[in-house]
């Protein structure tokens, strides 16, 4: 950080941001049933999967934040997240 500060004009403000992403949603669980030993009862379960990705970033010193909820975690989603952060950074 000191090296970066030395390369900038005196008095230039630097914003430090922290970023993370997380997947949330439904994930199929193992279905269990009580049954007599030696039998195999039908155990229907929900096999659908639904999830979303939360992308978030904060600058605690400035009290700023930027977040998106996306259907996938890929390069396109990260580009959109970086654009959202850029919209919050001081010029």
Image (tube, rainbow, N blue to C red):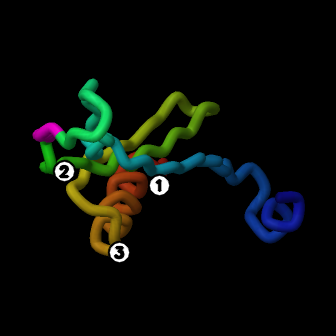
> Pointers 2 and 1 in contact (CB under 8 A)?
no
Q: Nearer the viewer, mark 3 or mark 2?
A: 2
The residue singled out by tag 3 in the image is 75
Residue 85 placement (x, y as % from top left)? 41, 52
Residue 89 placement (x, y as % from top left)? 47, 50
Q: Is residue 6 above or below residue 53?
A: below
Number of numbered discs on residues: 3
The residue singled out by tag 2 in the image is 49
The mark nearer the N terminus, 3 or 2, is: 2
Q: Nearer the viewer, mark 2 or mark 1?
A: 2
Measured Cα–Cα span from mark 3 to mark 2: 22 Å
Query: Seen from this angle, which residue lies furthest front?
Result: 38
Judging depth in this view, the residue of 50 and 79 nearest the camera is 50
The residue singled out by tag 1 in the image is 91
Judging depth in this view, the residue of 59 and 20 nearest the camera is 20
The mark nearer the N terminus, 3 or 1, is: 3
Magenta-span inclusion, residue 54: no
Judging depth in this view, the residue of 78 and 84 nearest the camera is 78
- Tag 2 secondary structure: loop
In this rendering, position of residue 42 left or right of residue 29 = left
Q: Residues within 10 Å of mark 3 (few under 14, many from 20)?
A: few
Residue 45's image quarter? top left
- Tag 1 secondary structure: loop
Magenta-span inclusion, residue 43: yes
The mark nearer the N terminus, 2 or 1, is: 2
Query: Seen from this angle, which residue lies furthest top?
Result: 34
Residue 72 placement (x, y as % from top left)? 26, 62
Q: Is residue 60 above or below residue 82?
A: above
**What's drawn in magenta, residue-wise?**
41-45
Residue at horizontal 25 percent and vertical 28 percent from the top: 35
Q: Nearer the viewer, mark 3 or mark 1?
A: 3
């Amino acid at each position: 950080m000191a090296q970066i500060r030395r390369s900038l004009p005196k008095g230039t403000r630097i914003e430090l941001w922290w970023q993370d992403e997380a997947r949330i949603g439904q994930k199929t669980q193992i279905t269990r049933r009580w049954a007599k030993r030696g039998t195999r009862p039908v155990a229907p379960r929900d096999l659908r999967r639904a999830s979303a990705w939360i992308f978030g970033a904060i600058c605690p010193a400035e009290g700023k934040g930027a977040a998106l909820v996306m259907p996938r975690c890929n390069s396109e989603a990260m580009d959109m997240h970086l654009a959202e952060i850029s919209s919050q950074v001081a010029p």
